[in-house]
Image: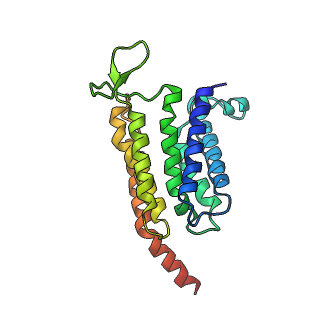
Amino acid sequence: MEFSLLWAALTAVAAAWLGLRIWDEHLPDRPMDHLIAAVVIGLVAGRLVAMIGDGVNPLTHPADIVIVRGGVETVAASVAFIAALVWGARKTPGAVDAMAPAVLLGVAGWHAGCVWRDTCLGTPSDLPWAWAQTGSLVTRHPVELYAAVGLVVGAIVVSRVGWRLWARAGVALGVAAGIRLITEPLRPSLSGGPVLWYTAGILIGAVAAAAGPRFAGSSANHST
């Protein structure tokens, strides 16, 4: 069993739980259940997409689905997580907004969990806080810790956004995508990373934050 991955996941869960305790206003019933269910759905979706991309048929190799360390397609996992979270809270308007700061804190916990997995480092750096992997003399940016700090700050910022439908959720999506976009150049990558997806996340978040109140108002007017 991959215990380092387990510890990273537990760090994310603990951070999200702490966020729900800190920012507990307007939360739906059993908010942690909503988050865990959405995470599981996201992981399964991301794993299935990764298996198909690697040429492995999930129908003929169902046992491979649970081997998360074998790879998870992060874009598919993120989209499925968001869709599951929104669908699960569909009967409670504003529930996703209420959980948004805790979600960001959970993602920060996942990034900080790089310490357990020894996956914090990115491109070479001579900065005083850079360090080298075991057996290497090349010091590198702790890019995942940069992302974790940025997400913690983002969670605090989102918690101060006013209570308008989709405002906090939209800002949270934009913050998460923006931080990944900013830190992506510090990650070793041949392709440059999913920059278009991060840009799309920023734009979708901005539209959601801006259009949510108008949608709520038009829905209310239509129902009357």
Look at 68% across and 29% down and name the residue there. Answer: 64
User: Residue 181 falls in which quadrant of the image?
Assistant: top left
* 123 horizontally vs 18: left or right: left
Number of marks: 0
Pick out the residue farthest to the bottom.
224
The coloring applied to the image is rainbow
Choose between 199 and 91: the one closer to the eye. Answer: 91
Q: Is residue 70 visible?
A: no
Q: How far across and how far down the image is residue 4, in percent?
A: 58, 27
List the single residue furthest toward the front. 22
Relative to 8, say whether 139 is above or below: above
Tell whether 72 sits left or right of 135.
right
> At x 38% / y 56%, what residue is drawn?
203
Residue at left offset 40%, top offset 50%: 153
Q: Position of residue 67 (x, y in %)?
A: 65, 29
**For the point 54% across and 62% down, which residue is it?**
98
Does residue 31 sit above or below 64 in this rendering? below
Q: Nearer the viewer, residue 160 or 67?
A: 160
Quadrant of the frame with the C terminus: bottom right
Looking at the image, residue 103 lies above or below residue 8: below
Q: State the image coordinates of residue 72 (x, y, percent, origin top left).
A: 56, 35
Q: Residue furthest top?
A: 135
Q: Is residue 183 left or right of residue 70?
A: left
Quadrant position of residue 210: bottom left
- Residue 118 in the image, given as x and y percentages of width and height: 49, 25
Q: Is residue 126 visible?
A: yes
Q: The N terminus appears in which quarter of the rendering?
A: top right
